[in-house]
Image (tube, grey):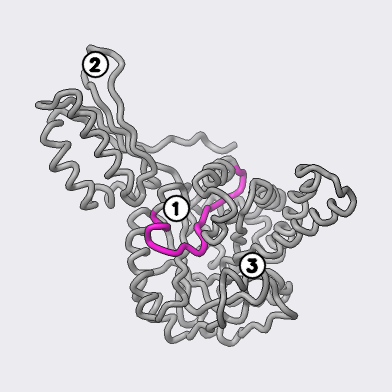
């Protein structure tokens, strides 16, 4: 299991002057290509699920596959929600398995951006999940980038960045220094002097959106000035589309699977080139040694009830599943009944948390407190509870 804490992952990159790639996924071909490339060059990697792409796939169906790939990978992997639009969407992403999140309210005023981001940070940190905040606006120029990120770019102001980081508590800061979302027109003109000022002003790893189309020299300079994460998608999309166009020219009556033959290899080659340019190739072993694994916690309660009939017990269970499953950091709520009639305890709750940090935030959450005090504890005097974590086998 190589799913690791994203905060640890990016701080290792920041402290050792390299950048981790966060590659947006739109299909299983992309997912397998990214993992395969990272394993070939022994690099840490971030699997990125971008909310603007949800129109192209079912997020709730996609994320279990992403998590399964991350957990079986032999290199350190984190999973992020990219360009989350609201607190609600970020809570959902965390509960479904993302262990890093990015809130995109960069077009709002500075006070509104700070207020919205602060609320997300407070919630996410209660789940042990780090947050990418964005100050400044990276606009698109053409294609999907322009459609999804319209308007004019706004470069990040260093003095505002200091206040933003201090007042929100974000773990990482995405900045605007001249990159664009989507395709470039010509060579990007990056404001490295601004980036240097930001690097000297804020003491958190920096993030670049719009990595496609930059030169190897530009990437080296970005990494030397505190950039620890580079978000990358358009170039992957373009190489995949070019493969399919080539297949269509050669085989106009080809099937879907024939037309997409070669997409995985092309995407993987592009990812591997990035990982080598950004300095993350060959880092997997040292990152695994220094990162905490991202492991769920299971909260188990076995209990008996008093003064409730079977119908009332099931009503109480149903209400608990409804209320508790919506609490940030709760992945799943299961209720059960003993098979043996003579069992010492008849009923059970199994609540799955995304991480150990949720034990405290769940305990104190007002919805949990209200349910426990009003509906559960008055009737479940005899109970046993335990929080446990799966013991992983030692790596060979």
In the rendered structure, the answer to whether residue 175 lies left or right of residue 264 reads: left
- Picture quadrant where residue 374 is located: top left
Distance of label 1 from label 2 (alpha carbons) = 38 Å
Of pointers 1 and 2, the one earlier in the residue sequence:
1
Q: SS at mark 2?
A: loop
The first of marks 3 and 2 along the sequence is 3
- Residue at image point 35% right, 80% down: 111
Q: Which of marks 3 and 1 is nearer the N terminus?
A: 1
Is residue 189 in the magenta section? no
On the image, numbered disc 2 is attached to which residue?
Answer: 343
Decide: is 184 above or below 130. below
Residue found 42% across the figure and 58% down from its top: 90
Part of the protein shown in magenta? 73-91
The location of residue 311, given as percent across then percent down, is: 20, 26
Secondary structure beneath dot 3 equals helix
Q: In this view, does 144 lie to the left or right of 306?
A: right
- Residue 108 in picture, x, y percent from top left: 42, 77
Circles 1 and 2, Cβ within 8 Å, touching? The answer is: no
1 or 2: mark nearer the eye: 1
Give neighbour class at mark 2: few <14, some 14-19, many 20+ (Cα, 10 Å). few
**Label 3 sits on residue:** 144
For the N terminus, the image quarter is top right
Residue at left offset 44%, top offset 80%: 161
């Amino acid at each position: 299991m190589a799913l690791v804490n994203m905060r640890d992952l990016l701080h290792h990159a920041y402290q050792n002057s390299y950048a981790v790639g966060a590659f947006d996924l739109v299909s299983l071909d992309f997912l397998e290509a990214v993992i395969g490339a990272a394993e070939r060059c022994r690099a840490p990697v971030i699997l990125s699920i971008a909310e603007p792409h949800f129109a192209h796939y079912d997020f709730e169906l996609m994320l279990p596959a992403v998590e399964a790939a991350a957990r079986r990978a032999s290199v350190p992997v984190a999973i992020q929600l990219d360009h989350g639009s609201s607190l609600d969407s970020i809570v959902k992403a965390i509960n479904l398995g993302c262990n890093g999140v990015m809130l995109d309210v960069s077009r709002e005023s500075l006070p509104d951006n700070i207020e919205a981001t602060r609320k997300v940070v407070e919630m996410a940190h209660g789940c042990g999940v780090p947050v990418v905040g964005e100050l400044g606006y990276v606009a698109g120029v053409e294609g999907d980038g322009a459609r999804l990120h319209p308007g004019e770019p706004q470069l990040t102001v260093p003095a505002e960045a200091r206040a933003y980081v201090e007042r929100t508590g974000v773990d990482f800061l995405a900045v605007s220094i001249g990159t664009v979302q989507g395709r470039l027109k010509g060579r990007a003109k990056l404001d490295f002097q601004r980036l240097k000022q930001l690097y000297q002003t804020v003491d958190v790893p920096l993030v670049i959106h719009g990595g496609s189309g930059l030169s190897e020299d530009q990437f080296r300079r970005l990494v030397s000035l505190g950039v620890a994460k580079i978000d990358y998608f358009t170039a992957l999309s373009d190489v995949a589309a070019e493969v399919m166009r080539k297949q269509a020219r050669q085989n106009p009556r080809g099937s879907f699977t024939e037309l997409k033959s070669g997409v995985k290899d092309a995407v993987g080659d592009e990812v591997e080139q990035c990982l080598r340019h950004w300095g993350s190739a060959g880092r997997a072993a040292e990152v695994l040694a220094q990162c905490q694994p991202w492991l769920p916690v299971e909260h188990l309660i076995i209990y008996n009830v008093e003064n409730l009939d079977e119908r009332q017990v099931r009503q109480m269970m149903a209400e608990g599943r409804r209320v508790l499953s919506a609490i940030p950091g709760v992945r799943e709520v299961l209720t059960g009944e003993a098979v043996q009639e003579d069992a010492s305890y008849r009923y059970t709750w199994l609540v799955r948390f995304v991480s150990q940090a949720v034990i405290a935030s769940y305990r104190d959450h007002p919805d949990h407190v209200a349910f426990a005090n009003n509906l559960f504890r008055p009737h479940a005097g005899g109970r046993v509870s335990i929080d446990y974590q799966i013991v992983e086998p030692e790596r060979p």
